Image (spheres, rainbow, N blue to C red):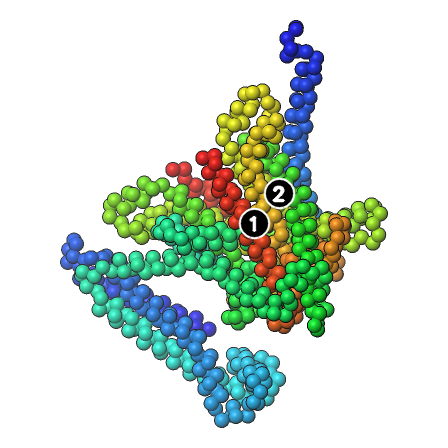
């Protein structure tokens, strides 16, 4: 009873410390709760405003000055064309670059420069890529403005570093024993990589690619720079036609004064979020299905 | 269209070459070890010889043919009617060019309509010449490749050398992009600084590029209000939201939450990072901004504007939460478990351990994460375009409308397209400043993270 550990002062201190512990824990819960609340609020408001606007006419129509006639098909098609260009350029380039850097690159000073520039490009603000696209593709090479070709090329430059980084991690995860086995039975280094390492790394590379493409699909700022904010009333029929993309359509509609466009904007946001959710879901599925623990 | 056909033709010839060479190599096969490379590699070797030179020639031809067509057309008798003045001449030729591609295109000059037919003919003629040239080169390349097919020819090493070259070229794209960004920004900024002095630009307090004319042009290109707005929204308001929420979320998820909770909450939190910025911008403009305006009015501010630094900053902060949280998560996880265990063994409570041991030990990593978050926030465009406003105010009041570097870049480059006016060029100068600042933040942060990881390994 006379132990100093049970003195009233000590009991008080322990109680205080336990209270502090509880408080800290609650702050943590509050922080995460607040973040999730914001996400829920955002989704609920968008669904509430936009769900009524989604019908067949909205999904198959193109942009119009009349809110009740305007639809998203033109923008969706523009997005598909743009993403097609982005994928066709950034995937092969990104995978080949990842293979080179991970498997063949000599440890020299200029390879360090390549690595630094890839890591940095992955963090450069997207609007800077827009400035690059404007200066190089439009003002120097005179490619058609506001076309999905130029949009796709600009986004490909932005997506490529993401694919290279995830590709390198996937290739790094393939155990050296696979390479040793292939080399031991007489495969050349190039055969080893293309016949054995790359197929095993492919699920990881695809996951990274889908995540990069999802980012590109939601991107608006660089496309503003290359003039993809034009009013496009007919869906683009080719890569060089003036096109709009889904996020750009959202941005354009959000500027309209007409009340009817509030519903259209929210409805287009729902369509975009569904696309993104599907892509991310596919990435997670791929990762879970093909992930190998060596 | 024609380039598409040519590409298809080249690839078709390449395919034919692949089969021919493979068949030829198979004929040479007399038994185990009689060939230095498998027939398939002989096929690839020949296909490369068909395709690569042909595509190179076609690319050169595509670059040269507009000039050839131009000189062919201006050599015609009808072209003598063209005006002497370079600009008019150029305009009419450009119009004729458009008419040749598309007969329905609008035409303003009668001469252009007359020139359209010759332009079309010349284009057709040079297109066909190019096609013939490409075919000749493809066949010549193929013939050379075909003569190489011998039993002892190391086709595989040759093909692999070409593959290595391709890999090298792919990895150089990244450095080319960086170089392209720097070169284009620096070049246009240089032109801008020939109109406006860099000192005016970097230290001036007044920004209104729309009214900039005459000799005191530099007075209207003072970018300090822009820099202040960017820092105030991206590095102050957004971080006041993102750092506590992100850090506490990370601490809760790593230290308190059960494994199941963590497995569910972490991906949900990451959805916040996956929502496109244009959606955040719309949310800020539609929901958050009016709330803040009403709040400002209730606080006694007179005519608060809908566009406020606070609305943009708050929403941007929420967008950054998962970013800060995952960086903090990684840094805390990198602290050796023995340090936390030691503290707990001494009788410290969990929260005391976190506050006194884990967070201080993880601090370099957390600071680096915050730097990366700031670099992302100041480069963020759509939220500020939709919620922050255009007025270049130098103010401390978060309810004021403020503008940022990214907002002004968008503002200056959409709309009118006189490319050489100081107004549009100033966007590139702003872009250069943004690029340099984010570059420094990224490089320092990456270095800190690397050193921090090494310290605990």
Above or below B258: residue B392: below
Pick the residue in front: A117 or A101.
A117
Rounded to the nearest whole Å, what is the CA distance between mark 2 and mark 1?
A: 18 Å
As helix, strand or loop, the secondary structure at mark 2 comes to helix
Q: Is residue A89 left or right of residue B367?
A: left
Task: Give the labeled residue for mark 2.
Answer: B321
User: Mark 1 or mark 2, which is nearer the start of the sequence?
Assistant: 2
Q: Residue at x 34, y 70 (%)?
A: B53
Pointers 2 and 1 within a single chain: yes
Q: Which mark is residue B208?
A: none
Q: Quadrant of the C terminus of chain B?
A: top left
Residue at image location 58% in from the left, 46% down from the top: B371
Q: Position of residue A45 (x, y in %)?
A: 70, 47
Q: Is residue A283 left or right of residue A51?
A: left
Query: Crowdedness of circle 1 by 10 Å Cα count: few (<14), some, many (20+)?
Result: many
Q: Which residue is mark 1?
A: B441
Q: Could you tell me which residue is drawn at 67 percent across and 59 percent down?
A: B203
Residue in front for this viewpoint, B335 or B145: B335
Query: x and y percent of residue A274 in the render?
Result: 59, 50
Element type at mark 1: helix
Q: Indicate the quadrant where residue A57 lies.
A: bottom right
Residue B390 in sight here: no
Q: Looking at the image, can residue B77 be seen?
A: yes
Is A219 rendered above or below residue B329? below
Q: Residue at 29%, 71% (x, y): give it.
A: B141
Q: Position of residue B54 (x, y in %)?
A: 35, 71
Answer few, some or many: residues within 10 Å of disc 2's Cα (few below 14, many 20 plus, some between 14 and 19): many
Please, which residue is most extreme toward the front here?
B199
The number of numbered badges drawn on the structure is 2
């Amino acid at each position: 009873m006379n132990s100093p550990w049970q003195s009233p002062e000590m009991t008080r201190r322990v109680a205080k410390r336990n209270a502090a512990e509880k408080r800290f824990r609650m702050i943590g819960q509050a922080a995460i709760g607040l973040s999730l609340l914001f996400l829920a609020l955002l989704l609920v408001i968008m669904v509430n405003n936009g769900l009524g606007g989604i019908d067949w006419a909205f999904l198959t129509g193109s942009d119009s000055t009349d809110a009740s006639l305007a639809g998203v098909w033109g923008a969706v098609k523009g997005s598909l064309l743009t993403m097609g260009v982005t994928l066709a350029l950034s995937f092969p380039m990104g995978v080949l670059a990842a293979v080179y850097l991970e498997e063949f690159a000599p440890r020299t000073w200029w390879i360090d420069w390549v690595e630094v520039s890839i890591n940095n490009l992955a963090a450069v603000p997207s609007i800077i890529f827009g400035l690059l696209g404007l200066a190089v593709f439009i003002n120097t090479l005179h490619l058609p403005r506001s076309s999905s070709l130029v949009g796709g090329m600009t986004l490909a430059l932005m997506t490529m570093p993401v694919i290279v980084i995830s590709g390198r991690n996937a290739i790094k995860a393939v155990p050296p024993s696979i390479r040793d086995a292939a080399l031991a039975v007489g495969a050349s280094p190039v055969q080893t990589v293309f016949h054995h390492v790359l197929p095993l790394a492919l699920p990881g590379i695809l996951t990274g690619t889908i995540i990069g493409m999802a980012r590109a699909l939601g991107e608006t700022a660089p496309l503003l720079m290359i003039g993809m904010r034009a009013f496009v009333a007919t869906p683009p029929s080719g890569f060089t036609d003036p096109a709009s993309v889904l996020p750009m359509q959202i941005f354009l509609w959000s500027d309209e004064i007409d009340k009817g466009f509030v519903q259209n904007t929210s409805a287009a946001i729902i369509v975009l979020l569904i696309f993104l959710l599907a892509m991310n879901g596919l990435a997670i599925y791929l990762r879970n299905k093909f992930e190998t623990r060596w | 269209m024609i380039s598409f056909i040519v590409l298809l033709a080249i690839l078709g010839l390449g395919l034919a070459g692949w089969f021919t060479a493979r068949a030829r190599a198979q004929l040479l096969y007399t038994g185990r070890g009689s060939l230095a490379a498998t027939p398939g590699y002989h096929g690839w070797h020949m296909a490369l010889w068909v395709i690569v030179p042909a595509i190179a020639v076609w690319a050169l031809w595509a670059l040269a043919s507009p000039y050839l067509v131009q000189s062919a057309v201006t050599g015609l008798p009808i072209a003598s009617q063209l005006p002497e003045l370079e600009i008019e001449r150029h305009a009419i030729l450009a119009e004729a060019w458009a008419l040749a591609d598309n007969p329905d295109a609008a035409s303003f000059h009668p001469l252009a309509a007359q020139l359209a037919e010759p332009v079309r003919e010349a284009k057709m003629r040079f297109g066909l010449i190019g096609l013939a040239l490409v075919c000749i080169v493809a066949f010549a390349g193929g013939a050379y490749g075909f003569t190489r097919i011998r039993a002892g020819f190391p086709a595989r090493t040759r093909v692999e050398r070409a593959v290595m070259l391709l890999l090298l070229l792919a990895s150089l794209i990244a450095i080319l992009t960086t170089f392209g960004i720097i070169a284009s920004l620096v070049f246009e900024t240089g032109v801008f600084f020939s109109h406006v002095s860099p000192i005016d630009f970097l230290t001036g307090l007044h920004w209104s590029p729309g009214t900039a004319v005459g000799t005191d042009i530099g007075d209207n290109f003072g970018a300090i209000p822009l820099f202040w707005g960017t820092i105030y929204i991206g590095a102050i308001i957004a971080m006041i939201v993102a750092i506590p929420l992100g850090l506490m979320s990370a601490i809760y998820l790593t230290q308190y939450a059960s494994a199941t909770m963590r497995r569910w909450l972490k991906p949900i939190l990451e959805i916040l990072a996956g929502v496109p910025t244009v959606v955040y911008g719309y949310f800020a403009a539609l929901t958050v901004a009016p709330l803040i305006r009403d709040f400002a009015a209730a606080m006694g501010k007179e005519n608060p504007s809908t566009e406020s630094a606070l609305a943009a900053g708050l929403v941007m902060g929420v967008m950054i939460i998962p970013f800060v949280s995952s960086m903090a998560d990684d840094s805390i996880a990198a602290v050796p478990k023995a340090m936390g265990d030691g503290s707990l063994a001494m009788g410290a409570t969990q929260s005391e351990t976190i506050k006194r041991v884990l967070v201080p030990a993880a601090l370099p990593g957390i600071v680096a994460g915050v730097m990366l978050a700031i670099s992302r926030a100041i480069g963020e465009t759509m939220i500020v375009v939709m919620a922050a406003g255009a007025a270049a105010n130098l103010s401390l009041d978060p309810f004021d409308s403020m503008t940022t570097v990214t907002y002004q870049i968008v503002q200056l480059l959409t709309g009118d397209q006189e490319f050489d006016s100081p107004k549009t060029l100033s966007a590139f100068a702003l872009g250069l400043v943004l690029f340099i600042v984010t570059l420094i933040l990224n490089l320092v942060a990456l270095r800190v993270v690397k050193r921090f990881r090494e310290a605990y390994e």
